[in-house]
Amino acid sequence: MFMNRATLIGYLAKDSENRTTRNGLNFAVLTLATKTSWKDRDGAWQSHSEFHRCIVWGKFAEFAATLTKGMHLQVEGELRSREYERDSVKHRIWEIRIESILKLDRAERRQEPDPAEADPDEAIPPDVPF
């Protein structure tokens, strides 16, 4: 049995980037930032941030295009590597091919009017009998 699964929880480091391949396929690139914190020998807090390149393909990329910098997300997908050559130097990068995105941001609260400030004449419609 084999499993290639990565789960990351972090914040978007920048707005998603929409792109199209030469063949006309849509995809989006997300940069997800994760952070690790620890206390050093002296008791002072240290931290390290890691930035992860995440790729979203197809119709799911249209949803990913709406994501903006600072959003708190959980992403899951397959870890992939690829190689390319630039200036006669081979490079290898690792990416998460996203299969699911969960927004962890809290929903914005609707501002409800204060009942103490409401007009008593508007509270009961005129056609409702007592």
Image (cartoon, rainbow, N blue to C red):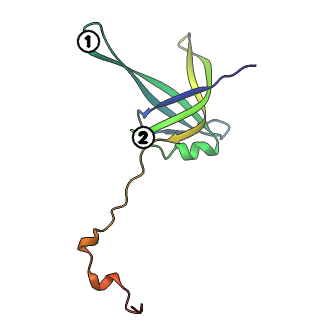
Label 1: few (<14), some or many (≥20) within 10 Å? few
Q: Vertical placement of 79 versus 44: above or below?
A: below
- Quickly name the residue at label 2: 71
Residue type beneath disc 2: Met
Secondary structure found at label 2? loop
Split into 4 quadrants, where in the image is the C terminus?
bottom left
Residue closest to the eye, 92 or 36: 36
Residue at (63% x, 46% y) in the render? 59
Residue 80 in the image: x percent, y percent?
62, 22
- Quickly name the residue at label 1: 43
Left or right of 22? Residue 115 is left
Residue 17 in the image: x percent, y percent?
49, 38
Residue at (57% x, 24% y) in the render? 95
Q: Vertical placement of 95 versus 63: above or below?
A: above
Left or right of 11? Residue 26 is right
Residue closest to the eye, 24 or 118: 118
Label 2: few (<14), some or many (≥20) within 10 Å? some
Residue type beneath disc 1: Gly
Residue at (72% x, 19% y) in the render? 2
Q: CA distance from mark 1 to mark 2?
A: 31 Å
Split into 4 quadrants, where in the image is the N terminus?
top right
Residue at (47% x, 43% y) in the render? 67
